[in-house]
Image (spheres, helix red, strand yellow):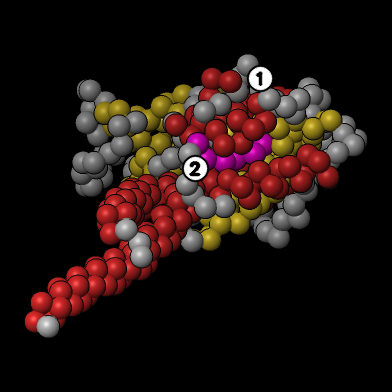
Amino acid sequence: MANLKEIRNRIASVGSTMQITSAMKMVSAAKLKRAQDAITQMRPYAEKLQEILGNLSGSLDLSENAYSEQREVKNVLIVGVTSNRGLCGGFNNNILKRVSYLVNQEYKDVNVKVLGLGKKIREPYKKTDHYYINDAIAPVEDIFSNLNFANSSTIATSLMECFKNKEFDKIIVVYNKFINAAVQDVRTEQLLPIESTVSETETAGDYIFEPSKEEIVSDLIPKSLKIQLYKGLLDSNASEHGARMTAMHKATDNAAEMKKNLTLGYNKARQAAITSEILEIVGGAEALNN
Amino acid sequence: MHLEIITPDTKIFKGEVDAVQLPGLDGSFQVLKNHAPIISALGKGTVKIDLTTSHETHENLSELVIKDSSNNKVIRVDINGGVLEMLGDKIILLAE
């Protein structure tokens, strides 16, 4: 028979764990709301930018651009986006798995570097030869403690620079896309070189272009790259809070279930103890009567 | 005409305006009502918005908007570059 005091202690500890997980769930829910708002805020911007770019590219050959140059792939940079904190289910593991697949399988014959955004990917790669950082990115490496467009732009600009001066021939971003609070999808997107997108909108309209189409395009492409990276970061941020909320919800449920079972066991043990005590007393009284 | 200024982080301004002065890559220019459709890249500079006939109060503007001290019908927004599209009396400015 389990010791009553032991069970009581376990019930208390499961109860306090449950309080922590349910508090973390509330916090994540609040943060998720804000992260989701941030995505909804920037979506019209991204859509409009894409639309204008589509309007322009109808009559222009974008492959002339410095950022769409296809080179023989010798140096690859993988930008992995994870969170700074754990306790969010498979969120970070999925990214780590995908990145390690890319490093060890898909690009094992070429020189691969990994730029980690978020502590959970930075730490495992810090000790390996694949770890990559440069002076421009270093100050904003810890982007998730202060996520805004300016910091994200700094990283994007530096990545574009790296591509242009041929330090890397291909730059890939791996992040969790936000589907809904419970579902994230690991995405592997090629940031550079720009993959030629066939635009379905060929209606350039009667626009006046000021200064010229070419100049506008060369101004817009870096912008859309910055937006692409920022969108990835915002998606990852929202996914993180969603994943943590779901994980903590499950943990709270499990704790409740465990507490129920423990309480049942405790009551059984208590009942058994009382029964045996009564039996002893009755047995003793019977013995005296005889 | 209707003007919207959007940044990746937030929407800075939305409302009816009389004229907008913009920092084009090749110099400053102004867009008035019924301007022909235009797409333009903008450089670093100030967007000056004229609200002379606007009856909207624009009370809760973002802190990025600066009110002109001498004329309370003019507001300014500093941008680091951007792109502008005007179509059918509606201007969308994607600022940075």
Q: Which residue is mark 2?
A: A86
Seen in the picture, residue A30 relative to A230 is either above or below; the reply is below
In this rendered view, identify the residue nearer to me: A276 or A199.
Answer: A276
Q: Secondary structure at mark 2?
A: loop
Answer whether residue A233 is visible to the viewer in this image: yes
**What's the residue type where badge 2 is placed?**
Gly
Seen in the picture, residue A162 relative to A62 is either above or below; the reply is above
Point out the image quarter for the C terminus of chain A. Answer: bottom left
A93 relative to A70 in the view: left or right: left
**What's the residue type where badge 1 is placed?**
Asn
Seen in the picture, residue A192 relative to A43 is either above or below; the reply is above
Q: Which residue is mark 1?
A: A134
Residue beneath the point at 54% across and 20% down: A139
A269 relative to A221 in the view: left or right: left
Where residue A172 sits in the image (x, y, percent)?
72, 40
Q: Which chain is mark 2 on?
A: A
Number of callouts: 2
Residue lying farthest to the front in this orientation: A290
Q: Secondary structure at mark 1?
A: loop
Answer whether residue B42 is visible to the viewer in this image: no
Residue lying farthest to the left in this orientation: A289
Residue beneath the point at 83% across and 36% down: A69
Residue beneath the point at 71% across and 43% down: A99
Region of the chain picked out in magenta, as a range: A79-84
